[in-house]
Amino acid sequence: MNPNESILASIEPASTPVHHNWIYRRVALPILALLRMGATPEKLAWSVAVGLLIGVNPILGSTTLLCLAVALIFRLNVAASQIGNHIVYPLELLLVIPFMRLGSFVFHTEPIPLSPKSLLESARSNPIALTRQLWHWEWHAFIVWACIATIAIPLIAFALTPLFRKLLLRIEHNQYPIISGT
């Protein structure tokens, strides 16, 4: 048994069978472990909320470092913020184009052409102009995302806090006792 499995096995609820689904192993058990190690429900909720929202920002490839920086600056739980960040990765890919379209609408710029033919034609005819335009679309999308995140992060944190408090109470009442990992 590797070290991660033994840690996860040590916090497995005694009253439930061992679950093998991804969300349980990669989200629920680490959150339970963080609560068990002394993370407060409030800080954990803010950390996960920040991770979730940073995880869907429209600048592809920036989420892990941005999430780490924000967690360190605001003294959040880095592990919890990264859990939130990584579970929403598929949403990031789905939301890039809507954020770019919303950014174009808000900033009154021409929308991003979604046909591969028009993008390829622009890349061939004037690659520098296309690069500049892509930067504008990304920047505008990022600003729109930041405005939405500013409102959504506290809402998500306030919604998660009671859930994490209930989990902590269950832990304290030994409903999630430590069991042997061997």
Image: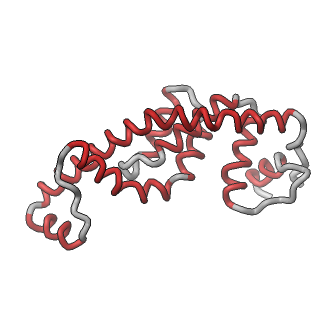
Q: Nearer the viewer, residue 23 or 10?
A: 23
Q: Quadrant of the C terminus?
A: bottom right
Expressed as whole percent of the image width and height from the top left, the position of residue 52 reads 53, 44
State the colouring used for the structure image.
secondary structure
User: How many numbered markers are drawn?
Assistant: 0
Q: Quadrant of residue 160?
A: top right
Q: Quadrant of residue 121?
A: bottom left
Asked if 32 appears above or below 98 in the picture, the reply is: above
Q: Nearer the viewer, residue 160 or 22?
A: 160
Q: Nearer the viewer, residue 132 or 101?
A: 101
Query: Relative to residue 180, is residue 57 drawn left or right?
Result: left
Q: Quadrant of the N terminus?
A: bottom right
Q: What residue is at 42 percent from the left and 58 percent from the top?
A: 93
Q: What residue is at 83 percent from the left and 37 percent from the top?
A: 171
Asked if 97 appears above or below 173 in the picture, the reply is: below
Asked if 72 appears above or below 8 in the picture, the reply is: above
Expressed as whole percent of the image width and height from the top left, the position of residue 72 reads 52, 30
Query: Relative to residue 27, is residue 5 drawn left or right?
Result: right
Expressed as whole percent of the image width and height from the top left, the position of residue 87 reads 57, 52
Q: What residue is at 37 percent from the left and 54 percent from the top?
A: 96
Query: Relative to residue 78, is residue 97 drawn left or right?
Result: left
Expressed as whole percent of the image width and height from the top left, the position of residue 124 reads 12, 68
